[in-house]
Image (spheres, rainbow, N blue to C red):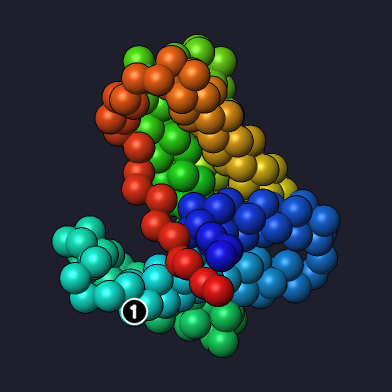
Amino acid sequence: MKKLSVNLLTNVVLLLAGIILIIFHGQPSIMLWAARVMGLMFLLPAVTFLVMVALRQPAERTSTDYMGVLPAVGGLCFGLVMIIKANLFDGILQLLMGILLVVLGLFHVIYLMLSSKSLSVKGWYYVCPIVVVVCGVLSLVLPALRDNIPAVVLIAGVCLLLFNFTSLQEYLAERRIRRAVAQSGQPSVPQPVVEDDTIIAE
């Protein structure tokens, strides 16, 4: 049996996207490729989630599964459009990148705040997500930065790597808690952790 985590897949896609944006940020056609990369960032997790829900038995599907279908379909369609018609997003891609960075950074900040007690979150855990939020805001409000496409792409790539580093910090903190609970033999305390949907395949 092999387990494929939607969260793991999302982080892998973001990591690859960050590396690609950093390496090719100076290329003349970088905005077209950046649009396609962002399209994949929406497409792959959406497809994975939809396949996961489809493979589950009806009795095993939860309300969270059904609530996630509509956003997943939206992400799938949006990702396809960004990949196939990348030129349509040339003028607004900097805006989309800035919004994406703000959303990703805030996601981790909120998660860490909700998990601060259960995961023993340290103050420096917040550094990377806050940097991502600040970079996203600056790319939205500073005209000089918005007009510098290579700089925006480079910043987005670096921030995606910071996002993955924060995800790794959270994973290691969760694993330490699970090990401590297993060694003590006590039932684990529920944590405000996003459900890790999985696909089980032979």
Q: In which quarter of the image is the N terminus?
A: bottom right
Horizontal side of 123 relative to 162 (left or right) equals left
Residue 187's spot in the image, x, y percent?
A: 31, 25
Give the residue at the far bottom of this rendering. Answer: 84
* Residue at the image point whose x is 51% and y is 57% from the top: 5
Query: Which residue occupies 53% across, 30% down?
Result: 175
Residue 128 lies left or right of residue 119; in this view the side is right
Residue 165 horizontal/vertical position (percent): 63, 35
In the rendered image, the quadrant that contains the C terminus is bottom right
In the picture, residue 124 is in which quadrant?
top right
Q: Is residue 113 at all visible to an observer of this figure? A: no
Q: How crowded is mark 1: few (under 14 residues within 10 Å), some or many (20 or more)?
A: few
Q: Where is residue 127 in the image (x, y as percent from the top left)?
A: 56, 22
Question: Tag count in the figure?
Answer: 1
Q: Is residue 199 shown left or right of residue 93?
A: left
Identify residue for label 1: 54
Residue 193 in view in this figure: yes
Taking the spot 75% from the left edge, 53% from the top edge, the residue there is 19
Q: Residue 129: x and y, percent?
A: 52, 32
Which image quadrant for residue 60? bottom left
Q: What amino acid is found at the position of numbered circle 1 in the picture?
A: Ala
Closer to us: 47 or 60: 60
Rendered position, 9 above or below 186: below
Say which of 16 and 59 sits in front.
59
Which residue is painted at 75% across and 60% down in the image? 20
Q: SS at mark 1?
A: helix
Does residue 58 appear to the left or right of 89 in the view shown?
A: left
> Which quarter of the picture shows residue 198?
bottom left
Front in this rendered view, residue 140 or 58: 58
> Where is 69 relative to 174, above or below?
below
